[in-house]
Image (cartoon, helix red, strand yellow):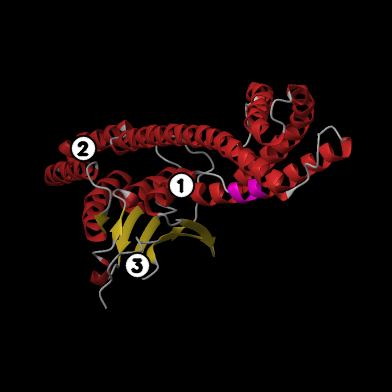
Amino acid sequence: MEQLNDKWFRIAGIPLSVVMLLLAEMPFFFPGRWDLLWKYTVVSIVFTGLIWENARHFLIYVRRRLPGLENTQRRVLTIFAGFLVIIAIGQALLLLFIEWLAIAPGHVLTWKAWFINFLLSLFSVIVIASIYEAIYFFGYYKITLQRTEHLKKEQAQKHLEALKNRVNPHFLFNSLTTLSALIGEDGPRAERFVDELSKVYRYLLRANRQRYLPLADELVFLQSYTFLLETRLGPAFEVRSSVEPRFFECKLPPLTLQNLLDYLVRTQTIAPEKPLTAEISANENGLTLICPHQPKTVWIDSGNMDWAEISATYEQQTGRQAVQAVVNNRLHFRLPFMQENPVAV
């Protein structure tokens, strides 16, 4: 937005403004002297061009220092102050040059001549600068609207992708496969599996309508979701929670813990000889999950989010950064709570 596409505006505007100013000054300084008009016109076009170009470069400089709609008032006042100085100096040099050329019938380097020239030039420059600023304002406003629409589309796309991940077909396929095996082996456990699966999908539908949910709701959901994973993966996988009740009202984006467990199942080795136990706790800094660091050498992308996407989404939703680290061969995840979260003492 700093560049000005005003080539023809300058080409036509400078001669036109000079002629208009000289015609306005003619009754005061050289009445009836049409022979002087063309001389003043040539000299004035040169100086007006110099004044215009200097004012134009100053305007571009100020726009770079004070861009955007939020700086409109400061930008306009700064430009106006700068134009006052440029016009004052430019008009003084113009009269000095005319005096030096001796093309005027009398003495022109006077306070009265300077002041009249200054006021007339100031009026013209204010009109021209207002046109520049109006073009800049509406152009920037248009860009802001386009950016806003682009962000809305991006958010809608991310929301759609999040919805796809929440009802990931791999999860449903694995759950139905596990249920099919349970039906013939353990009827009561199969019934509970169906109940927990129903709770999971009921929570998924609710989460689609919420921006944040209490940690207590996430932990209740986690119990059902963990049961499904533990049933499918066997005793090699376990989730333990030791979150104190005083943190239950703290807010998190919905399905934060589900995404984290999915990430672990997808990227970490889980086997009888390498069991994985995830321990969840909380403090004033946020939620913490710790588990052994035993990454798979090869893992298949099932359409779920990787850690970069989980972290970026979490930061976008909460304004706070999720952290992953490996300490003493153990994975540490820290998810800060929302800043306005209440914590009972």
Name the residue tied to disc 1. Answer: 312
Q: Percent from the top left, x then y, of residue 77?
A: 55, 51
Mark 1 vs 3: CB contact within 8 A: no
Name the residue tied to disc 2. Answer: 179
* Residue under the image location 16 percent in, 37 percent down: 183
Q: Percent from the top left, x then y, of residue 19?
A: 67, 25
Q: Nearer the viewer, residue 227 or 214?
A: 214
What's the magenta region? 80-84
Image quadrant in which you'd find residue 35 = top right
Disc 1 versus disc 3: distance between alpha carbons? Answer: 21 Å
Report whether 48 appears left or right of 279.
right
Mark 2: amino acid: Leu
Relative height, residue 137 to residue 332 (above, below) = above
Mark 3: amino acid: Ala
> In this orientation, does residue 268 appear?
no
Q: Classify 10 Å Cα crowding around label 3: few (below 14), some (14-19), many (20 and above).
A: many
Q: Secondary structure at mark 2?
A: helix
Disc 2 versus disc 1: distance between alpha carbons? Answer: 34 Å
| Residue 282 circle label | 3
